Image (tube, rainbow, N blue to C red):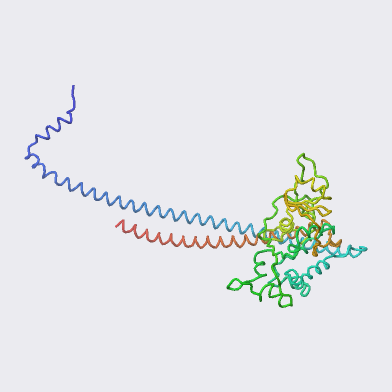
Amino acid sequence: MFQPPTPTGINKHSLHTNPLSIQGASSALVPVDLNEGTVDAKESVQNGEMLQVQSIFRHSQKLEDDLRMLGTKIKQHENNLYHLNSEKNKLDDSILHLQVTIGKSESSSKATIGDMDNPNPTNDEEVNKQILQHEKSAAGILCQLKIRHGAQASHLTLTKDVVGIVATLGKVEDDNLSRLFSEYLGVETMLAIVCKTYEGVKALEMYDMEGCINKSCGLHGLGASIGRALDGRFLVICLEYLRPYAGNYVVNDAQRKLDFLIPRLPNGELPSGFLGFAVNMINLDSSNLFCVTPSGYGLRETLFYNLFSRLQVYKTRAEMIQALPCISEGALSLDGGMVRSCGVFSLGNREDVDVRFPRPERSMRLDNHHIEIERQLKDVKWKKEKIMEELKREQILLDTTRFNYNKKKADYLKFLAQSSSDATQICL
């Protein structure tokens, strides 16, 4: 059987080849070696050119992908602007419709009020007198400014962000409750100034380079100009920085009362004598129910929720004490009992605070329909403000994306020109 020669046999023959045969073959081998070197060089050049072409293609593809992505973003921003403008036009129509409806409602309401017999007198004037008695207080100075300049006072740089003084921002049906609430809060809080934003807080008091109060600016300067130099500290409440109530509201309630869980004793029964929560016993003007803060909240879920929290109200002190197991954030009783917080009691004689909440007028009790229309109007206006902010932001994004697109397009055209020149050199 034929067996191919083993590698060992081949190696033996090669070892015995004489030198002359090798020398004789060398003249024939030289051209072969030169040809292989030329092929290797050509292949190396071709591989380099191929890598260069691939690099150009990849970079070109990346630039095209970037342009395509930016073009898609431009289209998205244009669509967003179109939809936002459409929404804005709808809101403008709604605002016009609601303003007409309110105008008719107010005309009807004034006619009805004019026919009422013995309307309840307002207590706002009395509250202003109480505030003015604190003549060197910040609240007293603001109240004096309002009396002297009327509606124009709210347009001054100093006061345009001021919502009001705590004592003037809510009304309480019962005089006894008003005294209790005033005592619970204290005169300093009742005289606190309420601002929408921190910009309003900064406008009330300014400082020099050394950090001292500038007596010629803000409320200090205003007080000095009317002969009522501001004395001592005063509280300012910034609605922007208050944590608002985050729960639900009582359904179909014109005053938008907060829907707290009713307290229950450990055995599941309702506490005897429980009348409600203090924050829901404050009556608000319709203008303060919605969109007072930059985030769209009203005064109940911001200011009064932070002042009263879940403060409970009971008929008697005895009933309040029996309900202690379900009192977590304080309680009051109509006969003067007071629990400041869980485990903290206020004892002794009642303190008669000389600044109180006024009682609501009968004329301010608009029917639910009128209040609902006002709520809708304020809500729609607030939505329009947010739409305008979104339009501005979307326009900025569109302009930025267009700028990036044009820059990327210029880079792409420049790259095409350069790569075309390189390709010509490769072909040569």
Q: Quadrant of the C terminus?
A: bottom left
For image coordinates 34% across by 53% down, the residue present is 52
Q: Is residue 231 above or below residue 424?
A: below
Q: Residue furthest top?
A: 1
Q: Position of residue 325 (x, y in %)?
A: 75, 44
Count of numbered circles in the view: 0
Reply above or below: 336 against 211: above
- x, y percentage for residue 119? 90, 63
Outermost residue, front direction? 348
At x 49%, y 61%, the residue is 404
The quadrant holding residue 222 is bottom right
Q: Is residue 366 shown left or right of residue 288?
A: right
| Image position, residue 58 (x, y; %) | 40, 52
Q: Residue at x 31, y 56 (%)?
A: 426
Residue at the spot 80% in from the left edge and 48% down from the top edge: 320
Q: Quadrant of the N terminus?
A: top left
